Amino acid sequence: MRLTAHAYPWDVLGDPGFVERTAGLSTVALASAYHSVRAATPLHPSHQLVEARYAALYRPVRESVWQGRRLRPLSPTWMSTSDSFGAAASVLRAAGLRVSAWVVLTHNSRIGTSFPDVSVVNCFGDRYPYALCPSRPEVREYAATLAAEAAEGADEVSLEACGQLGLTHLSHHEKTDGAWTPTAQRWLSVCCCDACQAGWSARGLDPSWVLSTLREAVRTSTEVSFADELLAVRHEATDLLRAEVLAGLSVPVTLHAHPDPWVTGASPGLTPSTGPDVAALVVPAWPTDSAPVVAAAVATGRPVDAYVTVLQTDEGLPDHARRLVEAGATGLAVYHLGLAPAWRQPLIREMAEAARSV
């Protein structure tokens, strides 16, 4: 049973007790390229919060690599070293742990705001600045370079947002819950940028007609006749992105993904060709009724790590872990060693023990 837990570099650095909380784990997925976040650090001896104000690369941002590129990462000014991932990885390896570089690819509000032409846009012309569209060759080149730089020296890689993000995003003072039906959300998550429209045209669709039909489908929560073509355009871009990223990596890769092909976000929907090119899938299983999601991913024939959290509830988590393993999960990816307070830390061990008992 593969057991992985997630953490940020600032969770590890400056906390002598951190490695004690990794007992029983085999791997730590350590953020190496990550989006902006306001993170709790309840067990850290020096601080209670870290505010990462923008998406950053926690490895050195080498000018020799990024010079002349419009899309490029920034170093985190809130960290005291330019290689906080490397420093934290050294601490973890000294404790006998494997280190996975946790890399977020197309979720970057700073880049999407600075260069809106590379962001996802919906059928009404509303841009999602947090979402970079993989139909753009420049986005794919940026993501591939970012992943290669972020993975330097890692034992493996955990790829998040290796595909398109859509409507849903937990932004500042979000006021969108309940505004749209699931069907409307699906159409509002279709990227309608110039590059995606070119993909529609290549499949015989008239972009102006597609846009007007999608707008009406959002308002009426109805289906559209060309859904398969829209999904094919998205999946083609996702496959190109994944191929370019994987070409620059030489260590095993676990891919955050969802068996529903229409899903967008941190765990994008699986495409028909996803799977054989990665070592394992990481499938979201935070709700305690997620066993069918895991089973659907297992049916693709790839090893599956069930992505679970100890932060949302403390009831029934060991049983939840057992059900996920019974559904075919060969590992657990636990969220989150740094965010969990003292009274939730034992839940990580309890879930691990329950998973091993199956």
Image: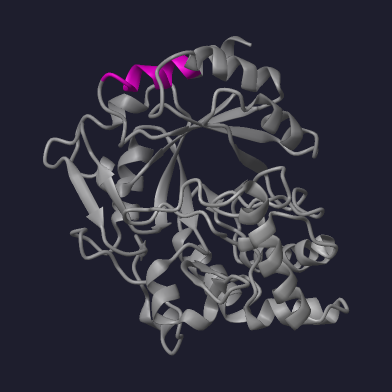
Quarter containing the C terminus:
top right
Q: Residue 2's x, y, as percent?
A: 57, 28
Q: Residue 184's x, y, as percent?
A: 64, 55
Dividing the picture into quadrants, the one containing residue 129 is: bottom left
Of helix, strand and loop, which mostly describes the magenta segment? helix
Magenta stretch containing residue 347, yes or no? yes
Could one spot residue 64 in this view of the protein?
yes
Q: Residue 219's x, y, as percent?
A: 64, 61
Residue visible at 57% across and 81% down? Answer: 138
Q: Nearer the viewer, residue 315 or 157?
A: 315
Q: Which of 218 and 173 is in front in this view?
A: 218
Q: In this view, does 149 lie above or below 274?
A: below
Residue visible at 54% across and 28% down? Answer: 287
Magenta stretch containing residue 14, yes or no? no
Residue visible at 83% across and 61% down? Answer: 228
Quarter containing the N terminus:
top right
Q: Is residue 358 above or below residue 212?
A: above
Image: magenta residue range: 343-351
Q: Is residue 326 above or below residue 260?
A: above
**From the viewer's perspective, is 69 left or right of 244?**
left
Dividing the picture into quadrants, the one containing residue 310 is: top left
Farthest left residue? 46
Q: Residue 329's x, y, as percent?
A: 66, 27
Farthest bottom residue? 68
**From the viewer's perspective, is 5 left or right of 51?**
right
How has the structure been colored for display?
Answer: one colour
**From the viewer's perspective, is 49 left or right of 153?**
left
Farthest right residue? 204
Could one spot residue 237 in this view of the protein?
no
Total numbered labels placed on residues in the image: 0
Q: Is residue 273 above or below residue 18?
A: below
Residue visible at 38% across and 35% down? Answer: 336
